[in-house]
Image (spheres, grey):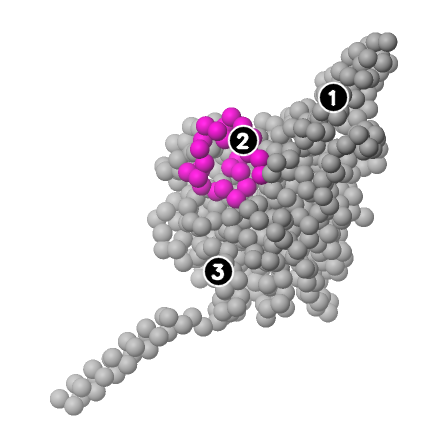
């Protein structure tokens, strides 16, 4: 009888200990890697080309001197557009080929209104909408001539760029760590297919889907707003699935309130494996707030993705309130940069800095010009270059990496570093990004940014600054010798209005144009 009581007591104690252990998660054990990198953190932002962010950075393959592309490659008499400096305070509108920034669930929108009018984040706008759909991107590419951007966008805004005065933290990171100037998106098109490449290295094949965004069994575009994802089941493997099978800790952090709901950025719930294993989604797909908690609680996994959404840091400047941190136009680049700096600071100020590599990249070109023709490794890509920064104590100091990379390189880096099998997609031939690191160097120090930068205010258009504004728009040149004066002015006007920063500017330019026309007729 005593023995039975003892056995029962021991059993009760063991159950209690098990419950206690399940309520307290100790530090995630260090996973064996082939380098000093034990934690890979992929921060994925939205919609900017390399030239748009770093085209004027010293030493890179940037915007060529005296570059100008035609308003229409098939009618060069209409004139040419040169690159010009944008202002981060001015929102750039997008065509409705994607959900607006910070809105990942189509149910949050009224479909009709968003299909008929562009989504505005602020009261100001600049020029025309920018699209980055499959067909638009290929028109911009123009069989490798890279001269169709203005014609494809029907706007000169595509030629705009930012510099250190607009995105200083990103340029600071490039100064101290690594900037990849030969990193291409995987597909010449928008977010959804490129996010599929980010997680799996491919965009198909799919079966049973006959939508306009599917071409020959492969996903090449974004679904329409309000699309019902039910019935979409992608049956190929992802890096996340590989890691689950190999017991390599991983997490997908998203800024959305409902993290396990699928959208064009958060694509893991669309894969058959996760639909068959919903517990894997529940365990690994979390809100971005958990990223902060996992660092504090020593739970940072071996591989992390951080996808923007509605969540923002508590330290963002007040002007960023209610704005998406994704940098997806019309979202502000300065607010997105502050959000990214906050995330980077969390790692730098933690015990994980010495064993981490943070890679910041952008999912597609966003309709912005880039001058480098992307390699065509198959019929779907690669796509245009995107900015990519490598931040780590083991990243080379102030290094510009010219090695060709694409999103599959992120997969290959994780696979090689954590001794995982290859997925067998684009990762097979992708460079693994190890050229960005030097594991024999003394570890680099942290670079803590304030995370509260606000770009310069938009210049109001008045009678006193119209002359300056007109001087800035000399990026448009025309070939007047081959056209009549009226045609020259019409072409100049069409291209110039594309640069207009809102209604006030457009009105000023229109009045200026009419004045010129009267002078011409007189």
The residue that mark 3 highlights is: 290
Q: Magenta segment: does it hold 113? A: yes
Q: Which of marks 1 and 3 is in front?
A: 1
Helix, strand or loop for disc 3: helix
Q: Which residue is drawn at 84% across and 12% down?
A: 520
520 over 392 or under it: above or below: above
Q: Position of residue 56 (x, y in %)?
A: 78, 43
Along the horizontal axis of the image, is 144 left or right of 298?
right
Picture layout, residue 105 above or below residue 150: below
Q: In which quarter of the image is residue 147?
A: top right
**Residue at left offset 82%, top offset 24%:** 477
First along the sequence among labels 2 and 1: 2
In terms of depth relative to the viewer, which is nearer, 184 or 434? 184
User: Distance from label 2 to label 1 (Cα)?
Assistant: 27 Å
Rate crowding at label 1 as few (under 14), some (14 to 19) or many (20 or more) other CA atoms within 10 Å: some
Q: Would you say the residues marked 2 and 1 are in contact, meaning their CB atoms lie under 8 Å apart?
A: no
Q: What stretch is highlighted in magenta?
A: 97-121
Mark closer to the chain start, 1 or 3: 3
Q: Who's the residue at 36% across and 55% down the image?
A: 279
Q: Label 1, label 3: how many angstroms apart (C-alpha)?
A: 51 Å
Q: Is residue 385 left or right of residue 44?
A: right
Is 63 positioned to the left or the right of 285 in the image? right
The tag on residue 300 is none
Which numbered marker is on residue 510? 1
């Amino acid at each position: 009888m005593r023995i039975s009581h003892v056995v029962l007591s021991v059993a009760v104690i063991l159950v209690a200990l098990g419950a206690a252990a399940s309520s307290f998660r100790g530090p995630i054990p260090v996973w064996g890697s082939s380098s000093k990198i034990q934690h890979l953190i992929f921060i994925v932002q939205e919609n900017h080309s390399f030239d748009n962010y770093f085209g004027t950075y010293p030493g890179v393959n940037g915007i060529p001197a005296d570059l100008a592309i035609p308003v229409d490659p098939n009618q060069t008499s209409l004139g040419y557009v040169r690159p010009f400096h944008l202002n981060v305070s001015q929102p750039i509108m997008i065509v409705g080929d994607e959900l607006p920034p910070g809105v990942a669930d189509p149910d949050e929108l009224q479909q009709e209104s968003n299909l008929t009018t562009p989504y505005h984040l602020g009261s100001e706008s600049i020029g025309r909408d920018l699209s980055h759909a499959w067909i638009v991107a290929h028109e911009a590419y123009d069989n490798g001539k890279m001269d169709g951007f203005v014609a494809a966008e029907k706007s000169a805004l595509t030629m705009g760029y930012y510099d250190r005065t607009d995105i200083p933290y990103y340029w600071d990171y490039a100064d101290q760590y690594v900037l990849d100037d030969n990193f291409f998106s995987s597909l010449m098109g928008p977010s959804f297919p490129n996010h599929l490449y980010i997680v799996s290295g491919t965009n198909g094949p799919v079966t049973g889907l006959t939508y306009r965004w599917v071409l020959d069994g492969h996903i090449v575009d974004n679904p329409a707003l309000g699309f019902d994802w039910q019935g979409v089941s992608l049956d190929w493997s992802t890096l996340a699935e590989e890691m689950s099978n190999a017991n390599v800790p991983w997490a997908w952090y998203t800024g959305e309130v409902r993290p396990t709901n699928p959208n064009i950025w958060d694509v893991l719930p669309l894969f058959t494996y996760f639909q068959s294993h919903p517990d894997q989604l529940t365990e690994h797909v979390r809100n971005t707030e958990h990223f902060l908690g996992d660092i504090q609680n020593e739970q940072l996994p071996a591989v992390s993705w951080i996808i923007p959404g509605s969540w923002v840091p508590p330290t963002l400047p007040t002007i960023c309130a209610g704005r998406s941190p994704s940098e997806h136009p019309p979202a502000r680049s300065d607010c997105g940069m502050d959000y990214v700096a906050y995330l980077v600071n969390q790692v730098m100020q933690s015990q994980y800095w010495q064993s981490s590599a943070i890679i910041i990249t952008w999912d597609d070109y966003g309709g912005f010009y880039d001058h480098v023709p992307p390699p065509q490794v198959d019929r779907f890509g690669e796509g245009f270059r995107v900015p990519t920064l490598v931040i780590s104590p083991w990243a080379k100091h102030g290094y510009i990496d010219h090695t060709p990379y694409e999103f599959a390189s992120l997969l290959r880096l994780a696979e090689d570093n954590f001794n995982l099998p290859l997925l067998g997609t684009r990762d097979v031939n992708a460079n693994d990004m190890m050229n960005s690191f030097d594991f024999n160097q003394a570890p680099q120090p942290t670079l803590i940014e304030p995370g509260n930068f606000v770009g310069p205010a938009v210049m109001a258009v008045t009678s006193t600054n119209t002359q300056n504004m007109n001087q800035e728009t000399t990026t448009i040149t025309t070939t007047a010798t081959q056209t009549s004066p009226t045609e020259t002015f019409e072409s100049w006007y069409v291209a110039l209005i594309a640069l207009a920063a809102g209604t006030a500017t457009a009105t000023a330019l229109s009045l200026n144009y009419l004045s010129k026309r009267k002078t011409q007729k007189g």
